[in-house]
């Protein structure tokens, strides 16, 4: 008999103030094989955020206005 699938639990967290989240799509969130979350988002700029044990780390990728409006995220083998 196959073993049961592991139980996955989600914790809801605020990564950034909602002002910066525009045009959210499924392509903005990725989960790596270790279960670490990676986000791309923006509106006033392009941001990249990833979850660590201590909380969310947020980096400004591009600070030009509007560049993050249609943000997308992809991961390779090195995240």
Image: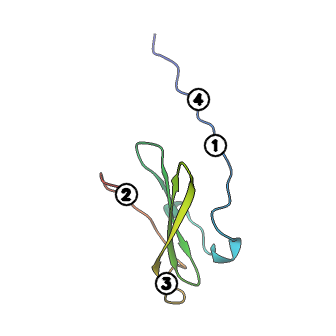
The residue carrying mark 3 is 67
Q: CA distance from mark 4 to mark 2?
A: 24 Å
The residue carrying mark 4 is 7
Classify mark 3: residues with Cα within 10 Å, few (<14), some (14-19) or many (20+). Answer: some
Q: CA distance from mark 3 to mark 2?
A: 20 Å
* Picture quadrant where residue 33 is located: top left
* Residues marked 4 and 3 touching at CB (< 8 Å): no
The residue carrying mark 2 is 75
Q: CA distance from mark 3 to mark 1?
A: 29 Å
Residue at far left of view: 77
* Picture quadrant where residue 42 is located: bottom right
Task: Using the image, tell me which numbered label, if any, was put on residue 63.
Answer: none
- Residue 68 sits above or below residue 55 on the image: below
Q: Is residue 18 left or right of residue 45?
A: right
Q: CA distance from mark 4 to mark 3?
A: 37 Å
Q: Which numbered disc, 3 or 1, marks the residue that appears first in the sequence?
A: 1
The residue carrying mark 1 is 10
Residue at far top of view: 1
* Residues marked 4 and 1 touching at CB (< 8 Å): no
The residue located at (60%, 68%) in the rendering is: 24
Camera-side residue of 69 and 62:
62
Q: Position of residue 60 (x, y in %)?
A: 49, 76
Classify mark 4: residues with Cα within 10 Å, few (<14), some (14-19) or many (20+). Answer: few
Q: Which numbered disc, 4 or 3, marks the residue that appears first in the sequence?
A: 4
Q: CA distance from mark 2 to mark 1?
A: 21 Å
Q: Position of residue 76 (x, y in %)?
A: 31, 56
Q: Which numbered disc, 2 or 1, marks the residue that appears first in the sequence?
A: 1
């Amino acid at each position: 008999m196959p073993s049961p699938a592991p139980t996955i639990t989600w914790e809801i967290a605020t990564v950034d103030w909602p002002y910066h989240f525009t045009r959210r799509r499924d392509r903005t969130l990725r989960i790596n094989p270790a279960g670490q979350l990676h986000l791309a988002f923006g509106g006033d700029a392009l941001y990249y955020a990833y979850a660590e044990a201590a909380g969310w780390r947020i980096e400004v990728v591009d600070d030009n206005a509007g560049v993050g409006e249609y943000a997308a995220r992809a991961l390779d083998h090195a995240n």
